[in-house]
Image: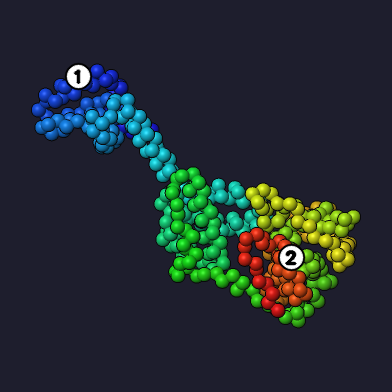
Amino acid sequence: RPYMGRRSDPITFRALIAKINVGKKSEQPVVNIACGDGLYVRLIGKDKNAGWYFRNEGKFTYLGRYNDFTLAAVRQKLKSLIADQELQTAAKALTFGHYKERWLETKKDRIRIANIKKTAEYLAPLDKIPVRDIKNPIIKNVLLKQNITPYKLSECISAVCSIMDLAVEDDIIEYHKCALLKKSQEIPQHIKGSGYKWQPVENFKDLFDRFVHTEPIYIYFYLLQALTGLRSGTCRTLKKNYFDFKKNLIVIPGQDMKIKIRHNQMRKPFRIPITASIKTLFNCIQQTYPASSDYLFARTDGTPMVERDISMPMSAVASDLAHPHGFRKSMRTWMAENGISQEVAELCIDHAVYGKKLSNKNLS
């Protein structure tokens, strides 16, 4: 509760009237009459104009004219004022770091949690700042001081927007303008699709020759991604029991997909038909790596392979701009070249098409 100076017991209405009558006869320019809990009636000037005041830390806050409020009414107004001050005091204690931790908690089950935590590290200089004091110039100054790629800058700004949204939901702030940073001329902009480029097939011959006998798991991964169109993160965490050879389907639970929520509820499992090529590939993986792990692509400790495991071989052989995600784009282009409708093709690669602009991946 805010400090209210010297406390006094609540006064009765009759006692207050008596003190006011005495105060009006006083020759002092200001007469303060304590009513309890920091509430005062002040008689000011020669005419002894009466008003209600709240005293806090030695300062008086005007509440209204004496004749406009009854004692009970002004006490109710004072309660509301104190509650608002307590809220402001609590709001000052709520830092950006507090809401960042809440935001991270909502992301803990994401496949890309390591990347999300890295984004949170870039925002660490903001942690001790009260969330009410977070403004775009402060965010911009923190981000531009660090050596961050345009793509990661875009992720950091999106994270800040989500974190500040939590403060808005708690009524700690009314709104924020963090989204405007994405269009700021001072921040290098990430152009979607500019991170990678098409690579000739010849560039991957050395890759296949190098790993097909020593570490064929990479080749198996790339082939499965090309045959299914799955995102790298989903492909890495595929479990063997997702493959139902009786129904010839790969059934991936909704929580393992990038888009987990649809129509405000957990999405249905994502299904992919098992072709003869996929079945052959699955058998090759089982014969080559008969590990006890539940994951199809597992490390020696049984955990799923991480993004670095998958992307490093390709980057080393082809170029730093090559990435397994290109196989997914190749599949989308192949579907466009073979006359498959946009709606069907987008659903095959798990793109949301409800009310959104369809992606244009036909780059052939």
Element type at mark 2: helix
Kindly identify the amino acid type of the residue bearing the numbered disc 1: Ala
Quarter of the image where the C terminus is located: bottom right
Kindly identify the amino acid type of the residue bearing the numbered disc 2: Val
Q: Residue at x 56, y 58 (%)?
A: 119
Q: Residue at x 9, y 28 (%)?
A: 27
The alpha-carbon separation of the residues under discs 2 and 1 comes to 85 Å
Q: Residue at x 19, y 21 (%)?
A: 19
Residue 90 location (% of width, % of height): 43, 40
Element type at mark 1: helix
Residue 292 is labelled as none
Q: Is residue 27 left or right of residue 278?
A: left
Name the image quarter holding residue 223: bottom right
Query: CB atoms at circles 2 and 1 under 8 Å apart?
Result: no
Residue 37 location (% of width, % of height): 32, 27
Q: Is residue 11 left or right of residue 359?
A: left
Quarter of the image where the N terminus is located: top left
Of the image marks 2 and 1, the number of the one nearer the N terminus: 1
Looking at the image, which is closer to me, 291 or 72? 72
Residue 118 location (% of width, % of height): 58, 58
Looking at the image, which is closer to me, 334 or 296? 334
Name the image quarter holding residue 154: bottom right
Looking at the image, which is closer to me, 339 or 238? 339
Q: Residues within 10 Å of mark 1 (few under 14, many from 20)?
A: few
Residue 18 is labelled as 1
Regarding residue 297, the answer to whether it shows in the image is: yes
Scheme of image coloration: rainbow
Residue 344 is labelled as 2
